Image: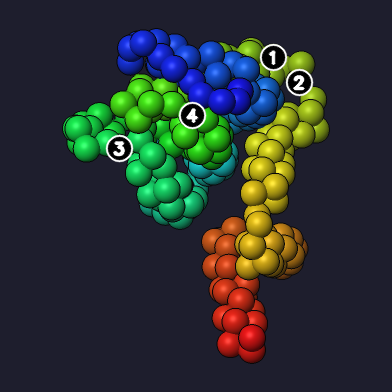
C-alpha cells in the first residue's frame, strides 16, 4: 500500500485492518508458527480449547512456547509466570512507541485498552508502516482489525496444527515454530539504521548462542541486557571520541 488510506467510518477502518492482516507476510508467518504451536500443545497433552484461550489472553507466540513447555514439563507455576513476564517486557517499548500514533486529543482511555493488549511484533511492525497513511481518528479501529485478523489466523491454524499433530514430524513442527523469531530477526535487521542498533543485534545473537550452549538460565534476558549494554557503551565511547 502507498499514498494514503481513507475510510468512511470506524467499522470500515476495522475491516480494512482485517484485510491488511490477511494480505501481510506476517499472516503466513503466524500460520506456520501456530501450526507448530498446535502440534506442541497436542504433544504435551493440553486441549485445543486451552490453546485457544492462551492465544487470546497471552497473544505472544514466544510466551506461549514458554507457557506450554513449562506446564507440559511440570515446572512450578511461579517459574513459568516469571519467565513469561520477562518475555513480555519486550512488548512494553512497542506499546510506548505505538500509542502516540493511535491516540488523538479526543481518544478515550478505554479506546486504548484493546490496541495495548493486541500489541505484538507483527501488529507493531505493520502499524508503524500503515498508520501514518490513515486519518488519526480511524487508527485505533484499524489496529484492532489488524490484530483480530492476525489472532483469527493464529487460532485457526492452531486448530490445524493440533489435529495434524499425529502426522506432523517433530522436525517440521520445530521448523515452523522457528518462523516467528526468523521473521522478527529479518524485520529488526531491516529497520536497524543506527550503528548502535546493529551492534546490539549482533551482540545479542552471539551472546544468546553462547549462553544457550553454556545452559545459563534466562539466557534470552541476559543476551538482551548484555548485548544492549555493550552496544550502548561502544556508542557512547565513539561519541566521546568524536
Query: Is 237 drawn above or below residue 135 in the view shown?
Result: below
Query: Is 163 drawn above or below residue 1 in the view shown?
Result: above
Among numbered discs 4 and 2, the one appearing first in the sequence: 4
Q: CA distance from mark 1 to mark 3?
A: 42 Å
Which of the colour schemes (rainbow, by chain, secondary structure, one colour) is used?
rainbow
Q: Quadrant of the N terminus?
A: top right
Q: Residues within 10 Å of mark 3 (few under 14, many from 20)?
A: some
As drawn, the label of residue 164 is 1
- Decide which of 39, 180 is in the foreground and name it: 180
Q: CA distance from mark 4 to mark 2?
A: 41 Å
From the viewer's perspective, is the residue at label 4 or at label 2 nearer? 4
Among numbered discs 4 and 3, the one appearing first in the sequence: 3
One can see residue 76 in this view: no
From the viewer's perspective, is the residue at label 4 or at label 1 nearer? 4
Residue named by callout 3: 103
From the viewer's perspective, is the residue at label 1 or at label 3 nearer? 3
Q: CA distance from mark 4 to mark 3?
A: 15 Å
One can see residue 143 in this view: yes
Q: Are marks 1 and 2 in contact (CB under 8 Å)?
A: yes
From the viewer's perspective, is the residue at label 2 or at label 3 nearer? 3
Residue named by callout 2: 168
At mark 1, the secondary structure is helix
Q: Residue furthest bottom?
A: 241
Quarter of image, res 107: top left
Residue drawn at (80%, 33%) of the image: 171
Residue 18 at x, y percent in the picture: 49, 16
Q: CA distance from mark 2 to mark 3?
A: 44 Å
- Decide which of 64, 4 is in the foreground and name it: 4
Residue 108 at x, y percent in the picture: 19, 32
At mark 4, the secondary structure is helix
Amino acid at each position: 500500500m502507498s499514498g494514503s488510506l481513507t475510510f468512511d467510518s470506524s467499522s470500515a477502518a476495522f475491516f480494512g485492518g482485517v484485510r491488511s492482516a490477511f494480505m501481510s507476510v506476517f499472516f503466513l508467518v503466524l500460520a506456520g508458527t501456530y501450526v507448530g504451536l498446535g502440534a506442541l500443545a497436542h504433544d504435551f497433552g493440553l486441549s485445543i480449547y486451552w490453546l485457544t484461550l492462551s492465544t487470546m489472553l497471552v497473544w505472544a507466540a514466544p510466551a506461549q512456547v514458554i507457557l506450554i513447555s513449562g506446564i507440559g514439563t511440570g515446572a512450578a507455576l511461579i517459574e513459568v509466570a516469571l519467565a513469561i513476564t520477562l518475555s513480555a517486557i519486550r512488548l512494553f517499548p512497542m506499546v510506548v512507541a505505538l500509542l502516540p500514533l493511535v491516540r488523538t486529543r479526543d481518544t478515550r482511555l478505554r479506546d486504548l485498552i484493546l490496541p495495548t493488549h493486541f500489541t505484538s511484533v507483527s501488529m507493531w511492525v505493520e502499524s508503524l508502516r500503515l498508520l501514518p497513511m490513515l486519518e488519526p481518528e480511524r487508527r485505533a479501529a484499524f489496529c484492532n482489525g489488524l490484530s483480530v485478523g492476525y489472532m483469527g489466523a493464529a487460532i485457526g491454524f492452531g486448530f490445524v496444527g493440533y489435529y495434524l499433530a499425529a502426522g506432523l514430524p517433530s522436525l517440521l513442527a520445530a521448523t515452523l515454530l522457528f518462523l516467528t523469531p526468523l521473521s522478527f530477526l529479518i524485520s529488526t535487521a531491516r529497520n536497524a539504521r543506527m550503528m548502535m542498533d546493529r551492534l546490539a543485534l549482533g551482540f545479542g545473537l552471539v551472546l544468546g548462542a553462547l549462553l544457550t550452549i553454556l545452559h545459563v538460565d534466562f539466557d534470552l534476558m541476559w543476551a538482551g541486557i548484555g548485548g544492549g549494554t555493550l552496544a550502548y557503551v561502544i556508542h557512547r565511547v565513539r561519541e566521546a571520541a568524536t
